[in-house]
């Protein structure tokens, strides 16, 4: 079966599956895809429990790393604010508290994105099975191609590294903006959640797109066509991942919800047949 390339002049990417509703409604609709993923989770507990195992392994590593970051955050805050060494104790402490919060915020953003990338690589067979099961319930996978396991794993790893690197580049300006009074403590966390949510959405839809022979640039373009929906889903997952043990429990459901998001972005049905 021939598949028309994304760059074909006959394909209007910006109009694919875009709902005729406002941005806020689409954002909430995207968050609702995670809830539907949780519903699928509840209905297939045996399969979904398998998806918890790789998430549990990754969580142990990343929680330990974040605990180490918290332990040394005061030293790191002093390291990045040498200009405050000669200030009065009050101002010096205030600046370093802000710096510490910025460091923890950057660590949280990179930690969530990296956790997702590592967990998807570790649990590739489990999450592939979950995604396939969801597609079967929705009528199958139109345009599916046969991708060897090792080839799929290499592509997934390469794309994950690219996304983590990009999130790092975006995270550095957010870290610096964290020093701005009020803005750094109110606006930056909101932007951070939106940025983290976007990267999570792009990361999590990898399996259903690979199944159709589509790589990172294509899935990014498809999600951009309905960015509010992708952001709604991604931000909901991001916030769940910040809850203790949330990443472990929600990861399989997030994979299921991401399959729904992928199908919606491709103009394919997301109602069970």
Image: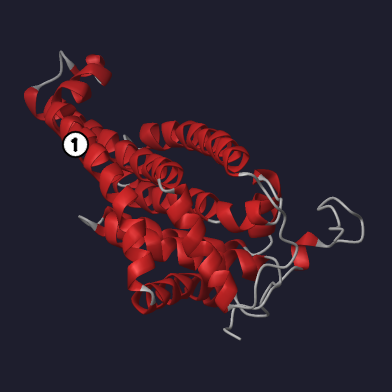
Image coords of residue 253 (percent x, y): 39, 66
Q: Quadrant of residue 19?
A: bottom right
Image coords of residue 136 (percent x, y): 58, 73
User: Is 156 above or below relative to 22?
Assistant: above
Answer whether residue 224 is visible to the viewer in this image. Answer: no
**Outermost residue to the bottom:** 273
**Outermost residue to the left:** 89
User: Is 79 above or below relative to 164?
Assistant: above
Q: Is residue 171 left or right of residue 42?
A: right
Quarter of the figure with the N terminus: bottom right
Q: Residues within 10 Å of mark 1 (few under 14, many from 20)?
A: few
Answer whether residue 68 is visible to the viewer in this image. Answer: yes
Residue at mark 1: 64
SS under mark 1 = helix
Q: Is residue 84 left or right of residue 146?
A: left
Q: What residue sits 69% from the left and 73% below the top? A: 268
Task: Count up the numbered dots.
Answer: 1
**Outermost residue to the right:** 9
Residue sitting nearer the eye, 9 or 193: 9
How is colour applied across the structure in the image? secondary structure
Image coords of residue 75 (percent x, y): 15, 21
Q: What residue sits 69% from the left and 45% below the top? A: 217
Q: What residue sits 58% from the left and 70% below the top? A: 135
Quarter of the figure with the C terminus: bottom right
User: Is 241 above or below relative to 99?
Assistant: below
Q: Is residue 186 left or right of residue 97?
A: right
């Amino acid at each position: 079966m021939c598949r028309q390339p994304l760059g074909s002049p006959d394909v209007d990417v910006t109009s694919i599956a875009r709902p005729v509703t406002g941005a806020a409604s689409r954002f909430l609709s995207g968050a609702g895809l995670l809830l539907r993923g949780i519903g699928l989770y509840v209905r297939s507990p045996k399969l979904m429990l398998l998806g918890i195992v790789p998430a549990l392994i990754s969580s142990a590593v990343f929680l330990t790393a974040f605990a180490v970051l918290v332990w040394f955050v005061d030293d790191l805050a002093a390291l990045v604010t040498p200009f405050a060494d000669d200030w009065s104790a009050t101002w010096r402490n205030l600046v370093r508290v802000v710096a510490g919060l910025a460091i923890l915020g950057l660590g949280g953003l990179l930690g969530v994105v990296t956790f997702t990338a590592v967990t998807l690589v570790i649990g590739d067979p489990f999450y592939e099975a979950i995604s396939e099961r969801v597609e079967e319930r929705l009528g199958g996978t139109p345009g599916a191609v046969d991708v060897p396991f090792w080839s799929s794993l290499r592509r997934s790893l390469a794309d994950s590294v690219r996304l983590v690197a990009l999130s790092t580049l975006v995270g550095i300006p957010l870290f610096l903006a964290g020093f701005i009074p009020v803005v750094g403590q109110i606006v930056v966390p909101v932007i951070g959640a939106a940025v983290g949510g976007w990267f999570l959405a792009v990361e999590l839809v990898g399996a259903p797109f690979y199944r159709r022979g589509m790589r990172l640039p294509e899935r990014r373009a498809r999600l951009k066509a309905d960015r509010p929906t992708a952001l709604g889903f991604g931000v909901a997952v991001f916030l769940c991942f910040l809850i203790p043990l949330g990443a472990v429990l929600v990861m399989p459901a997030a994979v299921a919800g991401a399959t729904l998001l992928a199908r919606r972005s491709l103009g394919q049905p997301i109602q069970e047949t």
